Amino acid sequence: MAIFIAKLLDFIGFIIAGATVIFIKPKWGIPIAGMIASFSTILIVQATGRSLPADLMALAFFAGIIAHSIHAGIVYYIKQLITKKKIINEA
């Protein structure tokens, strides 16, 4: 549970998930963006020289998928609201 909360508060993961989902139109892109962001954040942590213990690696990955999918869903629906308001204002 602590890893999930840490992933929810991960700002870099939020940016990666948000930037990924902006370029994807269908809803199935939300979990894809979550997977990409989770994998990217683990790679960033490994590249900085700090390594996760092997028993926590899979747990961090799957908790990251769920948390970053929530981030991607938030950005996706904000994007939908903005595009629908533009369509309504143009009509």
Image (cartoon, rainbow, N blue to C red):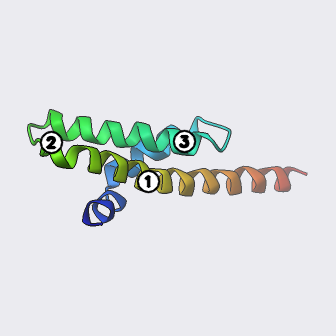
Which image quadrant: the N terminus? bottom left
Residue 30 placement: quadrant: top right
Looking at this view, is 5 or 90 the one in front? Answer: 5
Amino acid on which disc 1 is placed: Ile
Residue closest to the far front = 55
- Asked whether the residues under the numbered discs 2 and 3 touch, taking CB atoms below 8 Å apart as contact, a structural biologist would say no
Q: Which residue is mark 3?
A: 21
Q: Which residue is mark 2?
A: 54
Residue at horizontal 22 percent and vertical 44 percent from the top: 57
Amino acid on which disc 2 is placed: Ala
Instruction: Please provide percent x and percent y for residue 37.
Output: 39, 41
Residue at horizontal 16 percent and vertical 36 percent from the top: 46
- Asked whether the residues under the numbered discs 2 and 1 touch, taking CB atoms below 8 Å apart as contact, a structural biologist would say no
Characterize the local packing of mark 3: few (<14), some (14-19) or many (20 or more) Cα atoms within 10 angstroms. Answer: many
Residue at horizontal 20 percent and vertical 49 percent from the top: 56
Alpha carbons under labels 1 and 3: distance apart: 14 Å
Instruction: Please provide percent x and percent y for residue 47.
Output: 16, 33
Q: Taking 78 as reference, is 17 above or below it?
A: above
**Foreground tag (2 vs 1):** 2
Q: Taking 3 as reference, is 72 above or below it?
A: above
Looking at this view, is 28 or 18 the one in front? Answer: 28
Amino acid on which disc 3 is placed: Val
Q: Which residue is mark 1?
A: 66
Q: Secondary structure at mark 2?
A: helix
Q: Secondary structure at mark 3?
A: helix
